[in-house]
Image: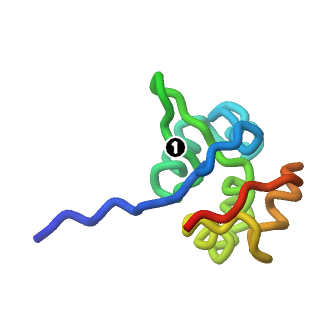
Amino acid sequence: MMPPEEPNFIVLIPHDPREACTLAQAARRAGKSESTVRNWCLNHGIGRGVVGGTWAVSKPALEMLLDDDRDALRAYHAGNRTGPVVRPYFERCGLLSKPRDIG
């Protein structure tokens, strides 16, 4: 039996530093521990590890997860950054000049 394939989430691509927050900031926003948010990054694709072993969490993706908006999160993972289900999250996070879609 083959091990399950790792999901290929497009997260924080293209990189816009305004979109990212730290694990600590995301944990405060969610009312959870940093380890919980790190697990969310791995399991739900809301962030990624960066150079030096730190993590960057996408603010819009975190909001999508907290809202349990699977359609928006799925679109975000596919590279959609401007569509109608994703756009409100970028606006909510104050990212008015949003990056273009990927792919």
- Residue 99: percent from left, percent from top: 73, 55
- Residue 88: percent from left, percent from top: 84, 66
- Residue 5: percent from left, percent from top: 29, 64
Q: Is residue 1 above or below residue 11?
A: below
Residue at image location 63% in from the left, 44% down from the top = 15
| Quarter location, residue 26 | top right
| Quarter location, residue 98 | bottom right
Residue at image location 62% in from the left, 72% down from the top = 75
Q: Nearer the viewer, residue 102 or 93?
A: 102
- Residue furthest top as drawn: 52
- Left or right: residue 28 versus residue 44 is right
Q: Quadrant of the N terminus?
A: bottom left
- Left or right: residue 7 versus residue 70 is left
The residue singled out by tag 1 in the image is: 48
Q: Which amino acid type is marked by label 1? A: Arg
Residue at image location 58% in from the left, 72% down from the top = 74
Identify the element where label 1 is drawn: strand
| Quarter location, residue 103 | bottom right
